[in-house]
Image (cartoon, rainbow, N blue to C red):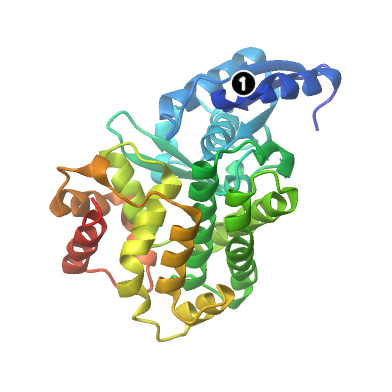
Amino acid sequence: RVGAGAAVLLVADPGLAPLGLVDAARASLRRAGLDVQPFTAFGGDPLSSAVDAAAELARTARAAAVVALGGGSALDVGKAAAAVARGEHPAEAYALCARPLPRAPLVKICVPTTAGTGSETTRTAIVTDGSGRKLWLWGEELRADEVLLDPELTLDLPAALTAATGIDALVHALEAATNRNATPGNDVYAHEAIRLVARHLPRAVEQPRDLAARAAMQRAACLAGIAIDNAGTAVAHNIGHALASLRPIHHGRAVGIAMRATLPWNCAHDPEGRWAAAAAALQATDPAAAFARLVDVVGLDTQLADFTGVTAEQLAAQMARPENASMRRSNAREIDDAALLMLAARVLERS
């Protein structure tokens, strides 16, 4: 789709520059005869303004494609910019499906350097507005045209980030397999992702140069991404997004803490045996205990000391906001307002 001499926007995580990966990607694209315009002006929980800036650069460069290199933030910025660049509105104008994304987006190539978000296989991009709200864009226009999984790109990921991103993939798979939208067909992806994380995440944390473990985790993240693209998430992501709207926190850590705190309540209601099946994929009988054990083994930081002063009422209010409503509704066990406050309090008990 992209011929020699075409311009390409390279959206790359700025943290990859010291590792030489941004220069290597740029050189590789240039050897293919492409004119490369790099964009690295964003951070974690990327602002919608960063998407707008990337889209404007793509327009100015007359880019035919976007290559997104990095973790979930880079992939989301790249996918969103590729769609927004073909329209007349800023990214926030498309948030929460307020209007359809522009048709015929730029070609999107996703190259993940972490194994967690699964953004490479979803039709969703998450951006943060000026007030700190995490908003989602959704549409077929955000689906990647090509995905390149190279486990060597994840070898230098620090242990803490390996753990946090891996737990993110596990939460994706668990929620997709147990929420109201779960289906036997989608469980093929979700349960395999659960099995892969349970078997390989501890090894990837303990032996970061183990290429087989890293490759397995990339497959897990990719499959879990497919699973949530089909079925969505649930209360752990509702809480994770709410936490991030109050204080800075890594997404994988946020949803891991949320799932650990809420899982005993959530899986106690299992009329269709969805949690039992997920536990079997974990090679356990008690999903709450198995999840907590894995979180401890990989060393995920579950203390919320950085949320001191945040009340359960404040967190519950964020959980109830419109941008988080779909995740609340998707949870298999109904979450009324009393349960919402109770779950918020359980999460903050770890602070």
Q: Is residue 138 left or right of residue 266?
A: right
Judge left or right: residue 155 versus residue 126: right
Q: Secondary structure at mark 1?
A: helix
Amino acid under disc 1: Ala
Describe residue 282's horizontal placement relative to residue 207 as left or right.
left
Q: Mark yes or no: residue 226 visible.
A: no
Q: Can the viewer see residue 137 in this picture?
A: yes
- Where residue 136 sits: x, y (%)? 43, 44
**Residue 28, image quadrant:** top right
Q: Residue furthest top?
A: 60
Say if 270 sits above or below 5 in the image: below
In this rendering, the count of numbered labels is 1
Q: Which residue is at the front of the view, 116 or 180?
A: 116
* The one of 203 and 343 positioned closer to us in this rendering: 203
Identity of the residue drawn at 63% across and 32% down: 68
Q: Quadrant of residue 179?
A: bottom left
Name the foreground residue: 74 vs 219. 219
- Where residue 114 appears, as percent x and y from the top left, is 60, 42
Q: Which residue sits at x=44%, y=31%?
A: 46
Residue at 44% from the left image edge and 79% from the top image edge: 286
| Residue 245 place in picture, x, y as percent | 29, 40
Q: Quadrant of the N terminus?
A: top right
Q: Compared to 174, does 278 lie above or below?
A: below
Q: Disc 1 designates what residue?
A: 17
**Residue 57's spot in the image, x, y percent?**
58, 16
